[in-house]
Each structure stands twice: as C-alpha cells, then as structure tokens.
C-alpha cells in the first residue's frame, strides 16, 4: 500500500521544503492542507517552485508523470457568504495551478456543516474529466442521499475515511472498536474509499497521536489497532487506498526535528505491517 504524510503539522519548514523532505525520506505522497497550500499557489513564484520540487523528485525517481501531491481542505460554513466566495475562488486557483503543472492526485475536504452540497457539486463538476480525484472526509457515512447519488453517477467522487475518527465512533458506540464493528461501518458506505487518515487515540478524544504512541497503546481497549484495520482493508480488496499518517507530534512535546523522527518511525512501522500482511 502507498503511504502519505499529512504535512501540515511540521511548521519548521515551508510547504515545498516539507514535500521534498518527506518524499525523499520514504513517503509515497505528500499531503498539504488547503489554508497553507492556497497561498503558495496564489503566489506565482512559490507555486512554480513547488511544482519544480515535485518535478525534481519525479525525475530522480524516473517517474516523470507521477502525482505525489494530495491536498486536504475545509469546506467553509455555508452561512458565511464571504467565506464561501473566497473558498470557491480558491478552488478555481487550485484548478488553474493543477492544469498548468499536473501534480495533484487527490483533493479532499473536511465536511463540518450541513447545507454544503452546492459546494460539493461545484468542486466535483469543476474537476470532472481531470486526473484529480475528489474526496470528502467521513461523508455520507450511512449511504448517499438522492442528490449525492445523482452527482456521483454523473461524475464519480470518493470517500476519505478517517480511521482515528472511526475508532472513536465505534468505541463510544458500545465500547467496540474491533474488526467486526469497523466492518459494519464500512458496509454502510456507498462511496468508494480512496484514502484513509491513520493516527492513534484512546477511543474517547481525537488526539491525533502517533501510531506507536506508548500512552495510547497502553490503553488496551480504546486505542486504534492499525494491524486490525489493515487486515480489514486487505479483506475488502482495498489495497490501493492511500494510508495518510495524520499525527500531530508538536502538540505532545515533540516539535521540529523530533516530530520528523516520530513521523518517519511511524512510516517504518506502517511499511513493516504492510509487508507482514502482503499488501
């Protein structure tokens, strides 16, 4: 399986520097966050530089046309008209940058508010026919309504599952966060899963701790069991799903290079589990 890093928790480097660092140190994809990515591409010089960094990595890997970038963005509150206008304008900017440079693989979105379908539709239709895959995090978890189903039929889009969030939902729903409870949650999904965020917690709070965080692993019942989750993806033949390590080491006393070391340590663990499971 391919592994990405959620690169917005490493503020001691720029977006381009983080992309270069993590891709050169073993991650398959670099994920930027919208509020940091958009200002970069709105600056012609910085946007070109980011593309050149990705071009160089591709050239060194002998994969000229590889798409190693994903971007994760927040849908704004639809009641805030000015925020929505700025957001939709930024979607146009992302589209223009992508058309010029061709590096974006997945453009995904957090969905926090009701009444956002008009933005979902705008984004999906904007990127229809391109090589960019549009995904929404923890969206339509109980199946699609008629509007989303019709849109998906016309222009396919995808699900991004945050496995840490699923761990909390399932643990709080009867104290079960095992293979069977995760499997039942996956059974309800209509949208195809293209990416999944992985991080650890205690089943109660969205800590975004490292996968191998000893405090979380010490919570025998509540912690997120990555090996179980990978077995679930394997059994469902979801071997092409991108595993995005979305940890926040700086929040727990590990800023800067210490956070880098933790992110690379988690990467080695994920790789070892994938090798063990043959995925």
Image (tube, rainbow, N blue to C red):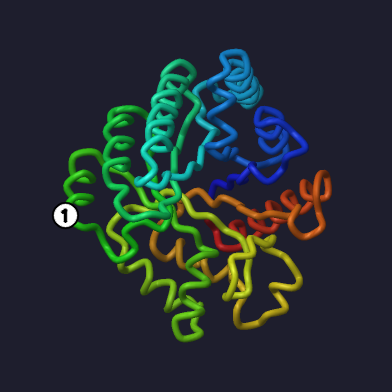
Residue 149, position in %: x, y? Answer: 20, 51
Q: Nearer the viewer, residue 233 or 188?
A: 188
In this view, which residue lies farthest toward the top?
A: 45
Which residue is at a point 44% across and 38% down the rendered structure image?
Answer: 107
Which residue is at a point 59% across and 25% down the rendered structure image?
Answer: 40
Mark 1 is surrounded, within 10 Å at the Cα level, by few (under 14), some (14 to 19) or many (20 or more) other residues, namely few
Which residue is at a point 42% across and 78% down the rendered structure image?
Answer: 180
Which residue is at a point 69% across and 38% down the rendered structure image?
Answer: 22
Quarter of the image where one finds residue 219? bottom right
Residue 223, position in %: x, y? Answer: 62, 74
**Under tag 1, what secondary structure?**
helix
Quarter of the image where one finds residue 190? bottom left
| Residue 240 shows in this picture | no
Figure label count: 1
Q: Nearer the viewer, residue 59 or 225?
A: 225
| Residue 23 shows in this picture | yes
Residue 276, position in %: x, y? Answer: 61, 62
Q: Is residue 257 left or right of residue 192?
A: right
Indicate whether 168 appears above or below 129: below
Which residue position is annotated with label 1?
146
């Amino acid at each position: 399986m391919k592994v990405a890093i959620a690169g917005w928790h490493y503020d001691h480097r720029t977006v381009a520097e983080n992309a270069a660092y993590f891709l050169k140190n073993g991650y398959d994809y670099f994920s930027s966050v919208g509020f940091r990515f958009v200002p970069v591409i709105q600056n012609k010089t910085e946007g070109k530089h980011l593309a050149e960094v990705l071009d160089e990595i591709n050239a060194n890997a002998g994969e000229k046309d590889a798409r190693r970038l994903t971007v994760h963005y927040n849908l704004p509150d639809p009641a805030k008209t000015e925020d929505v206008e700025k957001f939709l304008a930024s979607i146009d900017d992302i589209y223009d940058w992508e058309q010029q440079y061709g590096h974006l693989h997945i453009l995904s979105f957090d969905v926090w508010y009701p009444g956002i379908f008009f933005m979902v539709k705008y984004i999906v239709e904007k990127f229809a026919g391109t090589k960019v895959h549009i995904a929404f995090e923890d969206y339509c978890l109980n199946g699609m309504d008629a509007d989303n189903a019709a849109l998906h039929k016309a222009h396919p889009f995808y699900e991004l599952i945050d496995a840490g969030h699923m761990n909390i939902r399932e643990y709080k729903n009867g104290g079960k966060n095992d293979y069977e409870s995760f499997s039942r949650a996956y059974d309800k999904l209509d949208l195809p899963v293209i990416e999944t965020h992985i991080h650890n917690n205690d089943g109660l709070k969205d800590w975004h701790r490292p996968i191998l965080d000893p405090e979380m692993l010490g919570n025998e019942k509540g912690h997120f069991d990555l090996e179980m989750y990978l077995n679930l993806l394997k059994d469902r033949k979801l071997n092409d799903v991108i595993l995005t390590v979305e940890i926040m080491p700086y929040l727990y006393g590990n800023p800067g290079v210490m956070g880098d070391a933790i992110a690379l340590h988690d990467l080695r663990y994920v790789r070892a589990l994938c090798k063990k499971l043959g995925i």
